[in-house]
Amino acid sequence: MNPYPTDHYRSLRIALLGAGSVGSQVARLLLEHRDELAARVGAPLELVGIGVRDVAAKRDVELPAELLTDDLGTLVASADIVVELLGGIEPARSLLLDALAAGADVVTANKALIAAHGPELFQAAETVGAQVNYEAAVGGAIPIIRPLEQSLAGDRVMRVMGIVNGTTNFILDRMHTEGSTLEEALAVATELGYAEADPTADIEGFDAASKATILASLAFHTVVPVEVVHRQGITGVTDAMVEQAERNDRVLKLVAICERLEGEGGEAVSARVHPVSLPATHPLAAVREAKNAIFVTAESAGDLMFYGAGAGGPETASAVLGDLVSIARRHVLGGPGAAASTHADLPIAPFGDVLARHELALTVADRSGVLAGVAGLFAEHGVSVESVRQDPADGEASLVLGTHTASEARIAAVLDALEAHPDVERIDSVIRLID
Ligand SMILES: NC(=O)C1=CN([C@@H]2O[C@H](COP(=O)(O)OP(=O)(O)OC[C@H]3O[C@@H](n4cnc5c(N)ncnc54)[C@H](OP(=O)(O)O)[C@@H]3O)[C@@H](O)[C@H]2O)C=CC1
Ligand SMILES: N[C@@H](CC=O)C(=O)O
């Protein structure tokens, strides 16, 4: 028997903003599963309108024409809960601030908005006792926000690391497995609804950086501004880099790394996004297509792994609906909204100080002793060389540089020295490694 009979509570008025890849799926699920959701919440979820730019546009999902509107302001003003799936900063930010000011709760999948204006929205929600839920903003269908915000609230998270952008993972996977170009694979990812409206956000790492901001802020209970996240996308990944990785039994992935660092001056946090070369046996190497995987390391819990669909309309709609049901249940059962917890004020460690293993691919003059001489340059710059491999046929060499010595500043100095070296014909690639 349903413990919360739906006739004890009035309908909850849901305003949906956006009917694209995700919004259209949320609308479909709200309409198709109306009775089941009502039973689960204890009150009917009434979809009162769907805000779009073009009410006449053809859509993948057939939606009732009478629900579509381009008057988003009026729609928001009529709602108990606003579900924002427009993307971008404006008008999403203003509409959600209006909704919160009127006492409505908010669900959003908009990582760019939460990363840039999360604290402003959370503050606005706290003022009126409303709630902002954004599970779908990181990891698509994967539950990761709630585990960090709630399940691990009693632990000390030390590190959050993983693949958080489905589009770039799809592209790199296709480059490795099918020899596709970045452009070809991006076109397919866009067709499948994985890419952002402007896919520059995906391929230049902005989307992953927004997600890193959200993850680091939640994990370390602090505010990590998106501007301080070191960001490097995949547009610099060449066919040659993919081939070199494969020759070394490695796979290229775009990875986000958020860490609590112990320094001489105390604790600091670091968040960064960049391509890395992973051993083919690494668990992240097995993350294919648009899947995401996020590893969390916490002091007491140890290592945890979260894996699943990182993008896609129906998949992301699952997380949005979960947020919606959670908020709707609060309406029925009562209780205040939960504000986001950002208490500590940890300093941000400069990215340049982070030590990482790197692999350099070079082409050097084909004479004996040349490579040993070149390798000597690294010691001069305080960087250890863990291994050197050279193809005698063409002089192509691959050097792995050690973790505890390779900061960005030292690598930059070594690259300058290599460029000036008469026996170095070409620097083919430089990439960070993860073991
Ligand atoms: N796609 C995915 O896999 C995932 C997406 N997200 C996030 O979910 C959100 C939605 O993404 P997605 O569905 O892919 O986006 P789409 O670009 O497919 O859809 C956006 C929708 O918003 C409407 N819209 C955009 N701007 C306006 C505006 N100014 N006024 C009125 N309507 C507007 C569009 O209307 P119209 O159709 O008329 O043009 C469209 O219906 C984004 O924040 C995205 O980052 C999160 C996780 C995964
Ligand atoms: N464009 C994003 C969509 C989900 O967040 C991605 O590819 O991960």
Image: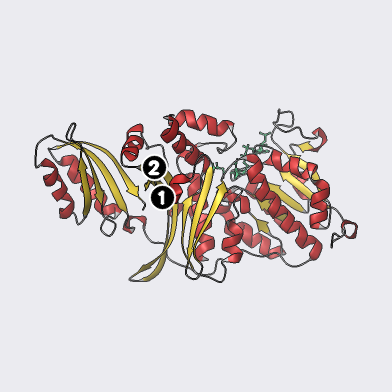
Residue 98 in sight in this render: no
Residue 160 place in picture, x, y as percent: 47, 58
Residue at 49%, 41% in the rendered image: 288
Looking at the image, residue 357 sits to the left or right of residue 91; the answer is left
Residue at 56%, 62% in the rendered image: 148
In the rendered image, which residue does mark 1 sit on? Answer: 282
In the rendered image, which residue does mark 2 sit on? Answer: 251
Residue 233 in sight in this render: yes
Residue type, label 2: Val
Q: Secondary structure at mark 2?
A: strand
Residue type, label 1: His
The disc at residue 15 is: none
Q: Is residue 381 above or below residue 261?
A: above
- Ligand 1 shows up in the quarter that is top right
Q: Secondary structure at mark 1?
A: loop
Mark 2 close to ligand 2, CB under 8 Å: no
Residue 79 place in picture, x, y as percent: 78, 51
**Mark 2–mark 1 CB contact (< 8 Å):** yes
Residue 216 place in picture, x, y as percent: 49, 59
